[in-house]
Amino acid sequence: MTHWIDIGRLDDIPVRGARVVKTGAGCVAVFRTGADEVFALDDRCPHKGGPLSEGIVHGRSVTCPLHNWVFAFESGEAQGTDEGRVATYAVRIESGRLLLDASRLATRSAA
């Protein structure tokens, strides 16, 4: 069962930027693309723990600020020759507000 929680306004996130949502199980990075799409991923790169929310958003991907690993928003998979993935979370826009699927957050373990 999906349980949506309001995490703020779309306009709170700059275009091609991110914001961090802190949860009891760790941080989630919520990204806004140039096309005003939103995606949510774990905010920790599996390579060296870099904060993905501080990475560069390009197209439907983000580049880790520490070692340039690139992660696809849809799958959380590392692109190119890098191997790894980060968890993804459902997020949607409703009347200009961002809603995050809290039921998925409940199943993840704290970092």
Image (cartoon, rainbow, N blue to C red):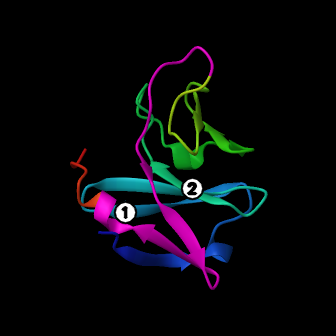
Give me the disc on residue 40: none
User: Magenta span has 52?
Assistant: no
Q: Secondary structure at mark 2?
A: strand
- x%, y% of residue 89? 44, 55
Q: Percent x, y for residue 31?
A: 60, 56
Q: What residue sits right under mark 2 in the picture?
A: 39
Q: Over which residues does the magenta segment extend?
A: 80-104
Query: Hey, which quadrant is residue 87 in on the image?
Result: top left
Frontmost residue, 49 versus 72? 72
Q: Is residue 66 left or right of residue 101?
A: right
* Label 2 CA crowd tier, 10 Å (few <14, some 14–19, many 20+): many
Q: Is residue 31 left or right of residue 90?
A: right
Q: The residue tagged with tag 1: helix, strand or loop?
A: strand
Residue visible at 52% across and 40% down in the picture? 75
Q: Which residue is mark 1?
A: 22
Determine which quarter of the picture holds residue 24.
bottom left
Name which residue type carries label 1.
Lys
Quarter of the image where the N terminus is located: bottom left
Q: Is residue 83 above or below residue 28?
A: above
- Distance, label 1 to label 2, CA atoms, is 16 Å
**Side of 105 relative to 48 (left or right):** left
Tell me the crowding category of disc 1: few under 14, some 14 to 19, or many 20 or more residues within 10 angstroms, Cα based. Answer: few
Which residue: 63% across, 19% down?
80
Front tag of 1 and 2: 2
Q: Residue furthest bottom?
A: 95
Q: x and y percent of residue 21 in the render?
A: 43, 63
